[in-house]
Image: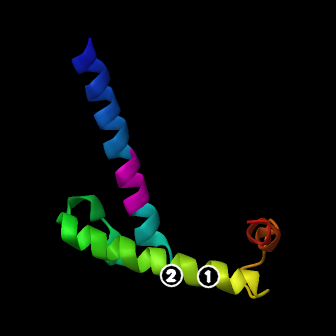
């Protein structure tokens, strides 16, 4: 029974990864190098994560200064969210 549940969870995870890969592939401006990222070596994955953490930190700082972190219209008041942190 445990094997069956684990097998179903693994299939679900794999399906989600394929869907995410497709979203990356079709998104204009997305980095295709991120497709299938779960297959790279741990140290390479750490480098990607570090770069994105630095990017996120920079974007949050800009939000606190009243700047936007994207070039798209806001659907929620993300600025208020980060100002309350």
**Residue 48 tag number:** none
| Element on which disc 1 rests | helix
Q: Which residue is mark 2?
A: 55
**Residue 48: x percent and y percent?**
33, 75
Furthest-front residue in this view: 85
Residue at the spot x=29%, y=76% of the render?
A: 47
Q: Per the image, is 73 magenta?
A: no
Q: Which residue is mark 1?
A: 59
Badge 2: residue crowd in 10 Å (few <14, some 14–19, many ≥20): few
Q: Is residue 30 visible?
A: no
Q: Is residue 8 visible?
A: yes
In which image quadrant can residue 81 be found?
A: bottom right
Residue at the spot x=72%, y=81% of the render?
A: 63
Eyeballing the image, is 20 above or below 4? below
Eyeballing the image, is 62 above or below 17? below
Between 77 and 30, the residue placed more toward the observer is 77
Residue at the spot x=35%, y=53% of the render?
A: 18
Q: Is residue 75 left or right of residue 59?
A: right
**Residue 50: x percent and y percent?**
38, 75
Quarter in which the N terminus is drawn: top left
- Tell me which segment is drawn in magenta: 16-21
**Residue 17: x percent and y percent?**
36, 52
Inter-mark Cα distance, 2 to 1: 6 Å
Q: Is residue 76 left or right of residue 27?
A: right
| Element on which disc 2 rests | helix
Q: Is residue 1 left or right of residue 26?
A: left
Residue at the spot x=68%, y=86% of the render?
A: 62
Between 49 and 14, the residue placed more toward the observer is 49
Furthest-top residue in this view: 1
């Amino acid at each position: 029974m445990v094997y069956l549940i684990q097998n179903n969870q693994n299939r679900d995870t794999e399906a989600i990864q394929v869907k995410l890969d497709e979203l990356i592939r079709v998104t204009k401006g997305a980095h295709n190098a991120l497709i299938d990222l779960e297959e790279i070596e741990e140290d390479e994955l750490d480098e990607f994560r570090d770069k994105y953490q630095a990017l996120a930190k920079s974007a949050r700082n800009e939000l606190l200064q009243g700047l936007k972190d994207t070039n798209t219209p806001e659907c929620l008041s993300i600025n208020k969210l980060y100002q309350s942190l």
